[in-house]
Amino acid sequence: MKIDRFSRWIFNSYSPSLEGLALFRIFTALMFLFFLMPDASYYSDLANFPDDFFSPPPGPMMLIDSFPEAWFFYIVHLFLIVSWLGILFGYKSRVSSLMAGVFMLILLGFIFSIGKVNHQMLLVLLPVIMAFSNWGEAYSIDARRADPPSQAEGWPLVLLALFVGFMMFTAGFPKILGGWLDGDTLATKGHLLNQYFVRGRTELLSGFMVDMNVPWVWSLLDWATVIFETGFLVAVLRAGWTRLFVCFAVLFHFSTMLTLNIAFLVNFPAYAAFLPWRKIHNYISPRLSSESDSINVALIFGAVLTGIFTIIKIIDKNDLILQLSEPSFDDLAIIGTALVIVIALGVRKAKSLIISVRS
Amino acid sequence: MSNLSVKTVKSLFIIILIFLPLQYAMVGIVGFYSSEPWPAFVFPGFKSIYVYGDNYQINQFIVEVETGETRLRREFTPQQFFYEIPNSQVAGFLRSNFDTTRGSETLETATRQWVRERARALVDTPAGDIYYLQRRRYMSRRDNNGLTTDSVKVINRLLIAEGVSHED
């Protein structure tokens, strides 16, 4: 049977393994549980705000009149934690994943009803989309059932790439209309000054960049930003291009973190979905377990990540290394590590290209 | 776990490929007349431009609290006054709640009381009138040593809560 291009794109772009997806599931669940849960200490503040401050964005939140009591937030927060624990251990993985999306949506809905929407929909989308990848079918409680395991599905990764690509496009397109490509405007610099002087984001390299007066560099940054953000949508058409643009995204977020002090950590679990998890599993599996006891892979992988994340959290909470207002040590450590991974992958790719050219 | 059929997945993709541009158009229209809707599958556009050549304009927002009998004014940045609100949301919060059309007469009594209590906690004494200021700072680069502030203009000054003597 002849498979059309559309079907090939959906079903053949990615071919993940159940074990690779399981490692990604464990990584993502720990990322959420350690770093990406809404700040629970904010709930009592929200509940105590006067009703005037409840300014929901146009949409379903307008059906509500005021912030609910703090106990409501705590209960939904607890449900969110339980859902992510369900994902971590692979217990009713699909339901847990869908519920993690729903509970996050509810909490974000109220948090954004203070009059400002932050763009964190990937926190909702990621578990919902990955629910259909069967990421809970290996190294999980679900996997111990009598039923034969389902196949790993690649199409949710295409769907995730499509959402990320489209959302990136919505960031880039208004910039074209707004004049970012006009050589005189230096829009990136304008935003840097705004963040520095108005929002008080004065950490890391921001001061150095404020003083940097090289117009062609600023103009280049304007162009690079627009090309990267709009180009992501085209990159979605091929897995290789998507991975390349995800690498660009890591560079982009790392540079905005250093200069604008804006760390968009919320996107990183979605970017991590495009890591070669099958290869990662194939590499670590023989080193961590025997064939008879393969669950060790997940246990050791999860334990090592938990240890690393705990150390990062302790350093962050106790201001042991950097005393920054923004970004946090969490952001610096994780986004910095992501950059190191991207550089390592780039070097490896370059080496293999050189070898293939020579041969 | 049962997988979705090939036909269902293809249909889902077709629906999403149609839905995404439509919802983006909706975000644009609603955002133009009101504010950005939520939930929506968009990232921030940051389309505004602040720099033209060597001249810069920066809008600053300040909460000003009168204190004591001398009515000495103390200034607080929004991040200091509304310290529990995340930095990424403060500017939007101000736009939504303290824009030029809203002053003390449109804020509820409970809100004005909340603002007074916050001011009192910050200045450590019963506060007088409390204002919300929008200032525009004009800056330029005269040499390579950094930026110089040329002038500061108050664009708007809004009474958001009356002092203790006016308390309801």
Image (spheres, rainbow, N blue to C red):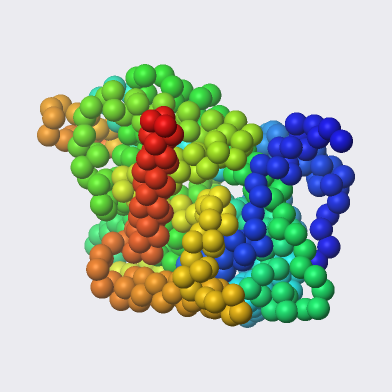
The x, y position of residue A197, in whole percent, is: 29, 45
- Residue A291's place in the image compared with A180, above or below, is below
- Residue A262's place in the image compared with A1, above or below, is below
The x, y position of residue A266, in whole percent, is: 51, 56
For the point 61% across and 79% down, the residue is: A292
Q: Nearer the viewer, residue B106 or B138?
A: B138
For the point 36% across and 75% down, the residue is: A311
Q: Is residue B19 left or right of residue B88?
A: right
Quarter of the figure with residue B126: bottom left
Quarter of the figure with residue B68: bottom left
Q: Would you say residue A245 is visible in this rendering?
A: yes
Quarter of the figure with residue A314: bottom left
- Residue A199's place in the image compared with A136, above or below, is above
Specify the quadrant that holds the C terminus of chain A. top left
For the point 75% across and 31% down, the residue is: A5
Q: Is residue A15 left or right of residue A32?
A: right
Specify the quadrant that holds the N terminus of chain A. top right
Q: Nearer the viewer, residue A250 or A329?
A: A250
For the point 74% across and 44% down, the residue is: A11
Q: Would you say residue A76 is visible in this rendering?
A: no
Total numbered badges shown on the rendered structure: 0
The x, y position of residue A76, in whole percent, is: 65, 74
The x, y position of residue A118, in whole percent, is: 54, 52
Q: Residue furthest front?
A: A359
Q: Residue furthest top?
A: A183
Q: Nearer the viewer, residue A340 or A288?
A: A288
